Structures are given as structure tokens and as C-alpha cells.
């Protein structure tokens, strides 16, 4: 136990109240860095130990076994007396690491769940220590300016090529908790523009949060357009719009969750414009292709949207959360204007104190922008582009490996970094069972997608340095597991499984 | 620049794509801790340097000057080539620290903006490094169980004393981004129970997020009940309920933002029960008094609520965010049930994979529960109680000091940790100007509240170790600044201000 941890215990148990300010209690102030240093050391040690104990992409044993180990490690959740900082960090961080599904392992590749960059995770520590809250200037003097700068720059990346910008304004972005909140904001802007009668029109390939947003905001169920080829059919969108009248929001997707494909944005934008509707593009997944000169062409048409979702905790390698809601004209964000005298009184605004409350639906708000700003500066546009390009290229490599396997069927060539495949001739039950068995054995985290009336394995390649050999290992692992499941035999899984 | 930072630069600028996996790129995996160690060292050094440069509770110069310094430090937001991890962290973390309003300084005491515990900030680093996402088990095997344990325990703290629990179920909680989201969930549950015609009834002392939630969810404007004595009048609530019929949600507050007072919860609960309405209590501020045997009596009646907001990033000293939405019966959370085949397919649920999607309105979700779990274990209930008690006692000390000053008027004795005061006989303009001047000079962060038709300074004591001498310094600083402003003279402010 470190010195500072011991001091907290002593303080908690009986130091005279306030008599001596315990060294090491707070993360901020001039003493904060010294207080944090030993504790952070404990965290890093525990992360290393936990990863070693896990020894794979996820813990072995399945939900009940993993939960049992966590319960055993935690013991009493809220003990009467504390055990001290070092001891608590050591035990719980180790348990979390031992029981993590770690996307830094190339065999953990199910979801849009990225391995974060070390530089971004380190930057995030400063956000935790200083704890600026972005609901008023006097809680975040520097953080609020940093957010404004980064949001403006990234919004320019999305809408900078649009000439002239709609309304002549400058593009801007809000920082969100992710694509779900960004999509919700896109629907909200349409509701405030068109009123409660607005209809949302989306493809059956749209993210579930589009439906959930409409429900949350008190709107009718979205009109869902069939997407038999995986992407929106502009003619079907036009037909749907004709059915609901002009007061509609079309939601298109640049990087679907299931297949990683991009709707035909220029054609959809054309239809939307013709019908006087609004267009929101969910580019939570695909948006970061904009960093790459070679890949940004795949997002052509994005700049015609009225609003766009982009997540930098997907192909941007940020720790969660780093969502963006991007609009071509900052004035449109006025929909969120809101007043609370203690945060943005009129006379304070008149005296030059920035009004931040309209920059989110949240009030208290962590500066997720810091890790993003540090990453942009550390890697530069080209550095980020290289990571995006690697992930997309690796998906191509994986698709090639799958195609070479006679027993496997590749659904199609990846557009972004998602690869769907399945065993030739197998039932959906086998596909589902293989995925669950690999999870239970702690060997791989595969995703699943129901498309074309069949269930597929989904690999979402987000590892920015994955190598061909690792992808080949993944293919072999899945192929062998499928053969075993199909044969009704258990896969050899070591003595510890289920223990 | 550290070795790992240099390796990122080299990689970004020209290493053969994927040929060598750069050491130090990712925070996770077996190499993550080693990659993080030098970067975290850089962050702690930069925090120390920045705090030293600030040399006070907030940066000097006011919004334009601070923004200028941030812009100068950031330079190009998205350079073509990166500068490397160490250099980016050093510059941006230092700028953020230099320009922070740091609640670890006792003179930064405006808002419900706490100085986080070092142990909580350190724990949060593990969340960033491992990046579990709580929308599915296979992204967060251990984190999801940890969340379930902590939520159950804390919900028990709120509703454990309730006999019998409504419906016989067990209490549960959801982790939220803060009181705003928790209040929104409270309103949402009422909407789903009573339908779109539900009316929200709240006091004029309620948090602004109650109104914003009703708007967001597509409901009518809340019926706002006058609270001339600062708290809800149960008779006025009953009258309002009679006016709107039984399909109503009453929102009461345990710790108002402006005055830190607690509505008469037992009487309000009685009225609500009589009228067949629902009761949501916003205890974002006051909730953590439950840790203290001596103080929890002030929240009597809380256990009769249908839902409760509690923020552990206020009197719980967590970095943002650590919100909780608490209900007496976990079954009520079924309102949020939601299906997305890739995250919670029926056959996966049947096979025992936990369904997490209904535990939030977000999809991707950071494990904010980790820092909370570590804090509970490190300090124990008594350790947390001691911090809560210190903050509340310190507010009493401050109130005493104010009362001793002939030139100052104390609005009332603090119920929680908020102290309101103003100069005797001064205009609202002077009160507002003093606050802004102290902000601009970087000398103190005071809050403001409009109550009883007048503007007050607000000090929200959240520092868990603030001493009497520091509170006396704050009183003297404000008193002297008020005298100077009233005299129309500038306060001496040093050569650097405005530079």
C-alpha cells in the first residue's frame, strides 16, 4: 500500500476533522500530481497483472463464471471502513482487466469497440484530475475554448468542402456521448424545424438508435424503407417521402453497424433536396475516413447533409466517449438554447462570459475534447489517416483469407472494415453456437449479423496494427470451432474453463 | 519526448504500413501499461507546471485573454504531421491546467463542481485504457457485473429502508451522465406510465433540467408551483395536482441548486400518494448525505419516491460523470427494454448472455462505475460520510463568518453546504460585478443566485478538507472587492492581468 493510500485510511478512520489536510486525497491543486503518481503506478501494475491472468481476448468461462470471479474480488461493495486507495485500486483494476474483452487483442473484433490509443487514455487522466465541467465558463475556462477550436476544425473536415455553406455560416459540432446521442440530436433538430408531426424515414439498415430517438422524442415510429441490397435505395426513399409529405427527416448511414456499408449519399441527398426534407447522416463509423485522402471519396455526398454523427471512439481510437454531432451552420444549434440563471444569466452574457449551456443536452459535462485534441496534435491528419487506412486494408486481407477457405462463405468485399462470413451450408444455430462457444472459452470475440435471411459472423476490424498472421489465426480458430460444433463435439478448452 | 512518443511519430510519418507494430501505440493489451507509464508521467508533470503557472483558483484575465492563451498553445488543431505523443500531451495538458477553474482550490466554490479524489481519478485511467463498453456483455464481461453490484448496493442505500419495497422487487439504479439525464429518466418513466398527457409538476426551485426534459420528451410545459420560502409547499402541490388530474409527476428536490435546501419530502410524498401521482426526487446534490448516519435524517421521505437522482460527482468527489437514477423496484426499468439483434439477440439471451442495452438510453457507454466502486472500497461508508460531514460543517463555519461581518447579509443557515450572502444595502449590479471581477482577476470563483427578488453570491462548499482560515480568506476577499466596486475603484490586480 502506498503512503498516500495509508493516509486516506487514517483520515477516514479517525483523524481530527479538517485538522490536517491529508496529503494525497485530491487529484487537483498543486498537490494533485504527487498524489496521483503512486496511485497511477498501482493502476498500471494492476492492469498488467490482470491482462496476464486473462491471457487472451476475453476471460474464460462465460457470464456466470466471470461474474463469480468479480463478486469474489469485490467482496463487500460498500464496507463500513475503507481498505485504502492502493488496496482498492489494486484489487478492482486487476479484476476489471482480468475480466475485460480487450480490443487491443486482434481476436477481440466483434463490435465498433476500438482499442484506445495510449496517448488518448493518458490525456483523459488530465480530464479526470482537473474535472472541468463544460456547462459554464467559470468551471472550464480553457477547456471551453479548446472544445470550440476542435469542434470548429472537425466540423470543417465534414462540411468544409461545401460551397457555399448553407446560410453562409460556419460549420460547428457538439461533443456527444456517441452516435446514439448524435442521432437523437439529428432527429430533435428535425422535430424543432418541422414540428411534432415530422416523420423519420430510414432504411432497415439504420442503427437502432434512430428508432429509439423517435420514441424518446415523442414522435411516431419511423417509416422503415427496405434495403434488400444492404443500402438505401434512393427510389424507395423518394416513394416513402411522397407518402409522408415534405415534413420529414431522412436518416442515411455511412458505415452500417451490421455490414459496414455506405448508403448512396449523393443520390439520397438529391431526393431529400427535391422533397424539401432534411437529411441526417449517421457516419458514426465511417466519418473518420475523412482523415484519409485515399478513402474520403467513399463519403462523397456527406457534405450535403443537414447534420452528421461521427464517433471518434470507433475509427478514431479514443476511449469512450468521443462523439460528435456536426452541422454545416453553427446557427442551427440555436435549437438547444436554454437558460438557467446560475449558469448563463443575461448580464453575464452581456459582460462577455461565454454561454455554454446550449452546447449539449447535458448540464455537467466532462471535457472529452481534451483526449481528441491531444490525439489530433500527436498524430496529425496523416497519422490518423494511416491508422484508418490500415484497419480498412486489414479488412480486405481478412476477406481474402476467408475467400481462400473452401469451407467458408464471404458475404461480400468490405467497404469499410467489416467482414461477414459463415460456414458453407451450416445452419444459423451453428453460427450462433460457434460465436458463443468462442466467447465462453475466452478465445475470440466475434460479432453476429442477420442479413439476407441468414446469420453471419461479423468481424469489425478496428485494430490499427493488426497483422496478416493474426487475421489468419482468427480464420483458423473460427473454422475449426465451426467444424467441432457441427460435429457435435466439444472444443478442447483447457482445465480452467468452467472452473 | 519519451521513447514511445517518438515511435508514434515515426510510425505516423513513414513506417511501412503495419510492418512493425509500434511499441506504445495502444493503451490496452499486454503492452499497454508500459506504453502508458511515460505518457502518464508527462501528464502529471504538465499538470504540476500548469497549476503553478495558474497560481490560483482560476486563470487571470477573463474569457478573451484565457481563450487567446489557449489558441496560442494549441496552434494548428489538426496539423498535417503529428508532433508526437509526449509533445502533444505536454503542451495541451499544461494549457488545460493553466486555464482550469480548479475546485481543489477552496476559493473555487461557485458550483456543484467538486474536486475529485485522487483515487477516483486514478481508477478512471483504467476505464480509459481498457475501454469496456457497457452495451453488451462481450464488450464488458467484468465491468457489467461490477456495475450491477454497485448499482444494487447504492440503490439499497436509497430504498433499503422502505418496507415493503413496492411490488416486492429489489431496488436498482442506472448509471447516468448526471442529474440532468437522471431527471429526464424520471420524467420518461412517468410518461411511459401515464402516457403523453402526463403533466409534470415542480417547484420554481426545481432544476432547469426538469423543464428541459419535458420539452425533450415531447410533453407540455411543467406546472410550476411557487416556492416563496425556497421549498415546495405541499398544499400548493396538492392544489396543482387537483388542477391537472392524477396523471402527473411531481418533481421534488433534495438540495436545490440555488440554495441547497431540501423540499419537505414526507409531506410531498403524502400528497402525491393521495392524488395517485408519481414522485421523482432530484437528490443529485443531497443524495450522498445517505452515507452519513448523522445527516441522512435530512433526507427522510426520500425512500417514498418512485425514482431518485443522485450524483456522485458532487458530494461524492468523483470526476464527471457519476450520476445515478435509482428506483425502488428493478422491474420498473423495463421501460427501457430495447432490442438490437447485434447486441442482445433472443437466442443469446436464452443462452445466458446478459442483456445490457436496457440499462441506458446510450448505446456505447464508459464504465463510470469503476471509479465509484474503487472509491467505495477505498474509503468505506464512514470515510465518505466524514467527507460529506466536513463539507456541510464547513458551510456552517462559513455562514458563521459571514454573520460576524457587519457589512454582509447572510440569507439563511445552510441546510446542506450552500451559503448565500450579499453586501448590506448593495445593488444587484454590484453583486454581479464583484463576482465577475473576481473571475477576471483569477482570485475566486463565486456563484450567483436570484432569490427573494435579489441577487446573492453563492458559495457551494464541496471541498472535503477546506479549513476555517481559507473560508475567512474568501469572506475577506469578497468583502474587500465589494467595497472597491461600490466605491467605483478598481481592485489592485497585479501586472499580469489582461496581459
Image (tube, coloured by chain):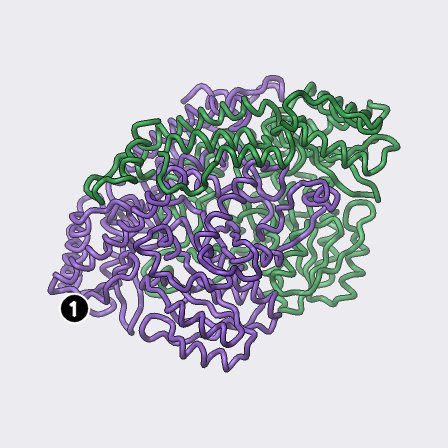
Chain colours: A green, B purple
Residue A127 in the image: x percent, y percent? 41, 40
Residue at 44% of width from left, 24% of height from top? A45
Q: Quadrant of the N terminus of chain A?
A: top left
- Quadrant of the rendered structure where residue B455 is? bottom left
The residue at the point 65 percent across, 28 percent down is A498
Q: Position of residue B272 (x, y in %)?
A: 48, 73
Decide which of B103, B85 is in the foreground and name it: B103
Q: Looking at this rendering, what residue extends furthest in the front direction? A: B164
Total labels: the figure holds 1
Horizontal and vertical percent for residue B393?
24, 53
Q: Is residue A299 left or right of residue A426?
A: left
Secondary-structure class at tag 1: loop
Position of A93 with respect to B488 (left or right) is right
A113, above or below A147, in the image: above
Q: Is residue B497 left or right of residue A228?
A: left
Q: State the residue in front, A282 or A458.
A: A458
Label 1 sits on residue: B424
Which one is in front, B450 or B321? B321
Give the image location of residue A477, x and y in percent.
74, 23
Query: Is residue B133 in view from this perspective?
Result: yes
Return the chain for callout 1: B
Quadrant assignment for the C terminus of chain A: top right
Quarter of the figure with residue B424: bottom left
Which residue is found at the position 75% from the left and 41% from the top?
A449
Crowd rating for badge 1 (residues with CA inside 10 Å; few <14, some 14–19, many 20+):
few
Can residue A379 be seen here? The reply is: no
Amino acid at each position: 500500500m502506498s503512503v498516500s493510500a495509508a493516509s486516506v485510511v487514517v483520515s477516514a478512520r479517525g483523524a481530527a476533522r479538517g485538522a490536517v489536510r491529508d496529503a494525497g486525497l485530491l487529484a487537483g491543486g498543486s498537490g494533485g500530481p504527487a498524489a496521483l503518481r503512486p496511485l497511477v503506478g498501482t493502476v498500471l501494475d494492476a492492469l498488467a497483472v490482470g491482462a496476464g491472468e486473462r491471457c487472451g481476448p476475453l476471460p474464460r468461462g462465460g457470464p456466470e463464471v466471470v461474474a463469480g470471479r468479480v463478486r469474489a474480488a469485490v467482496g463487500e461493495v460498500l464496507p463500513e471502513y475503507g481498505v485504502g486507495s492502493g488496496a482498492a485500486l489494486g484489487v478492482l483494476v486487476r479484476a476489471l482487466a482480468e475480466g475485460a474483452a480487450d480490443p487491443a487483442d486482434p481476436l477481440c473484433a466483434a463490435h465498433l469497440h476500438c482499442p484506445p490509443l495510449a496517448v488518448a487514455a493518458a490525456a483523459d487522466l488530465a480530464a479526470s484530475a482537473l474535472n472541468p465541467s463544460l456547462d459554464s465558463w467559470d468551471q472550464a475556462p480553457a477547456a471551453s475554448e479548446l472544445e470550440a477550436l476542435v469542434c470548429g476544425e472537425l466540423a470543417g473536415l465534414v462540411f468544409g468542402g461545401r460551397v457555399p455553406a448553407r446560410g453562409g455560416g460556419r460549420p460547428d459540432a457538439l461533443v456527444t456521448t456517441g452516435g446514439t446521442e448524435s442521432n437523437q440530436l439529428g432527429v430533435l433538430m428535425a422535430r424543432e424545424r418541422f414540428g411534432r408531426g415530422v416523420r423519420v424515414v430510414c432504411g432497415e439498415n439504420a442503427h437502432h438508435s434512430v428508432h429509439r430517438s423517435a420514441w424518446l422524442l415523442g414522435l411516431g415510429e419511423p417509416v422503415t424503407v427496405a434495403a434488400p441490397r444492404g443500402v438505401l435505395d434512393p427510389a424507395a426513399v423518394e416513394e416513402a417521402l411522397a407518402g409522408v409529405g415534405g415534413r420529414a427527416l431522412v436518416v442515411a448511414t455511412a458505415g452500417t453497424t451490421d455490414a459496414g456499408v455506405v448508403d448512396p449519399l449523393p443520390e439520397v441527398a438529391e431526393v431529400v433536396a427535391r422533397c424539401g426534407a432534411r437529411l441526417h447522416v449517421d457516419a458514426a463509423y465511417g466519418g473518420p475516413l475523412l482523415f484519409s485522402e485515399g478513402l474520403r471519396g467513399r463519403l462523397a455526398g456527406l457534405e450535403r447533409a443537414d447534420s452528421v454523427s461521427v464517433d471518434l471512439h470507433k475509427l478514431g481510437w479514443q476511449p469512450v466517449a468521443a462523439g460528435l454531432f456536426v452541422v454545416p451552420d453553427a446557427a442551427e444549434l440555436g435549437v438547444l438554447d436554454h437558460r438557467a440563471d446560475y449558469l448563463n444569466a443575461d448580464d453575464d452574457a452581456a459582460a462577455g462570459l461565454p454561454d455554454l449551456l446550449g452546447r449539449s443536452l447535458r448540464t455537467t459535462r466532462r471535457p472529452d475534447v481534451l483526449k481528441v485534441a491531444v490525439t489530433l496534435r500527436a498524430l496529425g491528419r496523416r497519422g490518423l489517416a494511416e491508422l484508418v487506412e490500415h484497419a480498412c486494408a486489414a479488412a480486405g486481407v481478412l476477406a481474402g483469407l476467408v475467400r481462400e477457405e473452401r469451407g467458408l462463405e464471404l458475404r461480400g468485399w468490405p467497404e469499410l472494415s467489416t467482414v461477414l462470413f459463415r460456414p458453407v451450408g451450416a445452419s444459423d444455430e451453428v453460427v450462433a453456437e460457434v460465436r458463443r462457444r468462442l466467447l465462453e472459452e475466452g478465445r475470440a470475440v466475434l460479432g453476429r449479423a442477420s442479413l439476407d435471411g441468414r446469420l453471419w459472423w461479423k468481424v469489425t476490424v478496428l485494430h490499427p496494427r493488426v497483422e496478416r498472421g493474426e487475421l489468419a489465426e482468427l480464420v483458423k480458430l473460427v473454422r475449426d470451432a465451426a467444424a467441432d460444433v457441427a460435429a457435435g463435439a466439444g472444443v478442447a478448452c483447457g482445465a480452467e474453463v468452467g472452473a
